[in-house]
Image (tube, rainbow, N blue to C red):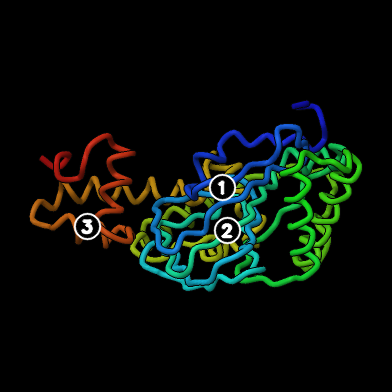
Amino acid sequence: MDASHPLSPLAPDWNETCKLEILAAAHEDWLGLPVRLERLPDRDEITDIVNTESTLVMARTGHGKRWYTTGLFTREFGTAPGMIDIYDAGYHIDRGRWDGSQGELIAIRLPANVLERLQGGDGRPPHFSTRHELFDQSLSELIHLLWREASNGAPRGRLFTEGLTLSLVGLLLSHEGSQRSTATHSVGKLGAKAQSRLLAFVDTELGTDLCIERLAAVVGISPDHFARMFKSTFGQTPHAFVQDRRIEAARRALKQEPDRSVADIANGCGFSSQSHFTEVFRRKVGTTPRRWRQ
């Protein structure tokens, strides 16, 4: 595969961030966006999922419901053939659950470096906001066509692949409501006062749903711009930052409040369950909360 090709798929972490069973991958000669066919389970549950790159997912077959939990809040969504979800870079859930009939999903990654090269490398790549339960016949037809090309090794050639990709990106941008500016500029960083307000807010509200929209509102910045400025300032996504603060608060509580139950500490620090808290704590600290307390 030619990594210099403007559509060369460079997504080495896809296997780590996506936990669904792979039914089929793009042909080895495919030079378009990373795309593959995945199984939509009839019943399944996953935990601690962070989306590192913008991703588009369309149900090809299967019906059911999904429940996504972040902190103490759970949102319910449907799934049906032709239904499209768009997940922005940095989107996360603590827990996801499916219940319905088994089916298939077409998943397409939208790596920023690929989109930037597609623009000629002279501007900021487009950003796609998270959207659920989207139906768009034109977008659906493009996704099906792109998968057929990818699975067959792009029999219609490079120009057709590039045209498909540009059409796909154009339709996605139309759902954003307006074209994103391609002017070059630095992301910038949050000022000292904004950082102090954010830290105080996060530490006070650890037990609540600390979504990007709420965090952005604290400093009066749009969620889109806030996510980029936050990472530029703190070197990590808002989700990773909040999770680290929650673990630090839990460590203090485990030591300073010996009579308080682990379940109560998990709830107070914003974890969806004791099992999720234990899983994250073990990954961050290297041991379970009970052993660390001892």
Residue 225 at x, y percent in the picture: 67, 55
Horizontally, residue 277 falls left or right of residue 43, namely: left
Residue 8 at x, y percent in the picture: 76, 34
Amino acid at dot 1: Leu
Foreground tag (1 vs 3) = 1
> In which quadrant of the rendered view does residue 11 lie?
top right
Residue at position x 37%, y 48% in the image: 245
Q: How far is disc 3 from disc 2 in space, using C-alphas?
A: 39 Å
Image disc number at residue 104: 2
Image quarter (top left, top right, bottom left or bottom right) of the N terminus:
top right
The secondary element bearing badge 2 is classed as: strand
Horizontally, residue 195 falls left or right of residue 223, namely: left
Question: Can the viewer see residue 221 in this picture?
Answer: no
Residue annotated with mark 3: 265
Amino acid at dot 2: Glu
Q: In front here: 130 or 267? A: 130
